[in-house]
Image (spheres, rainbow, N blue to C red):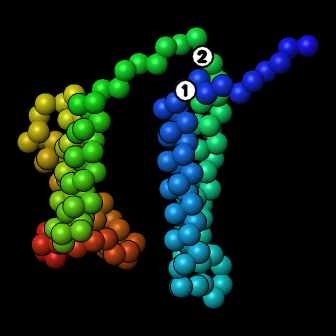
Amino acid sequence: MTERSLKLANRPAAAVAMVLFTVAAVTYWDASEMTARATYGMGANAASYFICLLLAVLGVGHLFTAFQTSAVDAEDADWKAIGWIAIALSGLIGSIFLGAGFILGSTLLFAFTARAFGRKALLVDLAIGAVMGLVIFLLFNKLLSLALPQGPFERLF
């Protein structure tokens, strides 16, 4: 009879699993603290519970991957691309936090993410991101009557 032991074969996958479980727990806690309740149908916290479930499922998948041995060698991370994506997300979060609005934030997110994928036309990407951000803002704000974070550009519309 052969004896199988659990051996951590992929440490980065285990680390990602722990991060996903942590974010799922925070999302669950945040959803449970929402005070707005629906009188009928689903409440505002239903989407947060769904995201929590999705994050937990992704965490379980990463955990399974962490304990599987693979014949394929993992590639080295492209830290330059990861840095650009971190700058892109920081640009979005920062522009919303500082009151610059959704359009500017999504413009920065698009342009810097395109840079992370190797594209070098920053001004063109900024223009494409601005058009996409404007279209998305108008779709949500005017058509769906949902409020996105407003800044100086959004107040023009």
Q: Is residue 121 above or below residue 57?
A: above
Badge 2 crowding class, 10 Å Cα cut-off, few under 14, some 14 to 19, many 20 or more, is: few
Q: Nearer the viewer, residue 126 or 82?
A: 82
Mark 1 residue type: Asn
Q: Earlier in the sequence, mark 2 or mark 1?
A: 1
Task: Give the farthest residue toward the left.
Answer: 123
Q: Is residue 126 above or below residue 114?
A: below
Q: Which circle marks residue 10 in the picture?
A: 1
Q: Is residue 124 left or right of residue 112?
A: left
Q: Report the Cα–Cα distance between label 2 and label 1.
A: 9 Å
Give coordinates of residue 127: x percent, y percent. Answer: 13, 48
Point 57% across, 60% down: residue:
25
Task: Give the farthest residue toward the right.
Answer: 1
Mark 2 residue type: Ser
Q: Which circle marks residue 59 in the picture?
A: none
Which secondary structure lies at badge 2? loop
Q: Is residue 108 above or below residue 12?
A: below
Q: Nearer the viewer, mark 2 or mark 1?
A: 1
Which secondary structure lies at badge 1? loop
Point 22% across, 73% down: residue:
150
Q: Is residue 136 above or below residue 118?
A: below
CB under 8 Å between discs 2 and 1 = yes
Give coordinates of residue 157: x percent, y percent. Answer: 18, 74
The residue singled out by tag 2 in the image is 70
Point 53% across, 85% down: residue:
36
Q: Is residue 126 left or right of residue 29?
A: left
Kindly indicate the quadrant of the structure image that contains residue 32.
bottom right
Residue 110 seen in the current view: no
Task: Give the farthest residue toward the bottom.
Answer: 39
Give coordinates of residue 1: x percent, y percent. Answer: 91, 13
